[in-house]
Amino acid sequence: MGFEVRRRLSVADTVTLFNAVVGFVAGAIAFTDPHLAARLILLAVIADAIDGIVARNGDSSAVGPLLDSVTDVVSFGATPSLFLYVLLTDAYGGIESAHPAVFVGLALLASAYVVCSIVRTAFYSTYFDAPDERPGMPNTLGSIIIATAYLSGITNPLVLSVGALGLSLAMIAPFDYPKPGPKYAIPMGVVQAVAVIAPMAFFRAGPRAMLAIALLFFALGPWVYPGE
């Protein structure tokens, strides 16, 4: 039969794969330009939202949900962890200069986010089928918080990594996080786009506003946010 890629992939799948490319590039660029990498992580989040909108409007495929899950692990699991790893090793030394125990500790701290993202994605694929079953913080939300915090001026790698550890645990916590509907998602997308395009404008207004929104959703979403 063959793969029949052109016939079996939808427009939404193409956007999903674009998300994967952006996420991969963000991880690669983190080694030389963490500021640009943070912006690309936010761009990947926007692409993820767009592919969901396209899929819900009828242009989806049988393979779409699996592609979306795999891409989420790349862009919003592996890439944020790699981003944190680069910041930590730049500050405290990599494998060639740090004490082995220190390096192992840094690697474990940075990898916690991707490990919990993988666990959450695997559990969703296996155990949760109902649309109202959404336990754990979405890895996209955690990625937004990490990236906007850095763009807002919170650049201490230990502060970011300890915060990311808390976000990692939230991904496997037993709290249901609703999915934002268009009424909320579109304005949030606009603010996020500003954070990507002009992160330094007006005293970092874009990333700081997006960070505030994301933190409010993180803290209050399971209890007061209506969702779609």
Image (tube, helix red, strand yellow):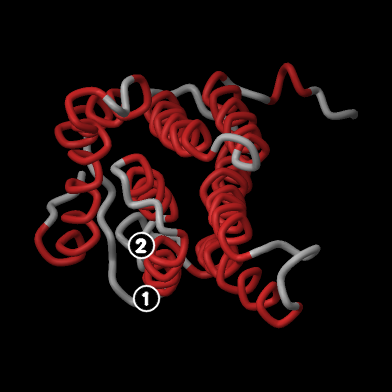
Please tell me whether residue 58 is drawn above or below residue 93 in the rendered image: above
Please tell me whether residue 107 is drawn above or below residue 144 in the rendered image: below
SS of the residue at dot 1? loop
Q: Is residue 74 left or right of residue 80?
A: right
Q: Is residue 190 left or right of residue 52?
A: left
SS of the residue at dot 2? loop
Name the residue type under label 2.
Met
Q: Quadrant of residue 75?
A: top right
Number of callouts: 2
State yes or no: discs 2 and 1 in contact (Cβ < 8 Å): yes
Q: Quadrant of the C terminus?
A: top left
Q: Quadrant of residue 189?
A: top left
Please tell me whether residue 101 is drawn above or below residue 39 in the rendered image: below
Q: Residues within 10 Å of mark 2 (few under 14, many from 20)?
A: many
Residue drawn at (65%, 69%) of the image: 107
Q: In the image, residue 3 lies at what x, y percent?
A: 84, 29
Could you tell me if residue 146 is visible in this image? Answer: yes
Please tell me whether residue 213 is drawn above or below residue 103 in the rendered image: above
* Residue bearing the label numbered 1: 173
Q: Residue furthest toward the front?
A: 97
Q: Quadrant of residue 172?
A: bottom left
* Residue bearing the label numbered 2: 137
Q: In the image, residue 214 lies at what x, y percent?
A: 24, 49
Name the residue type under label 1.
Ala
Could you tell me if residue 122 is visible in this image? Answer: no
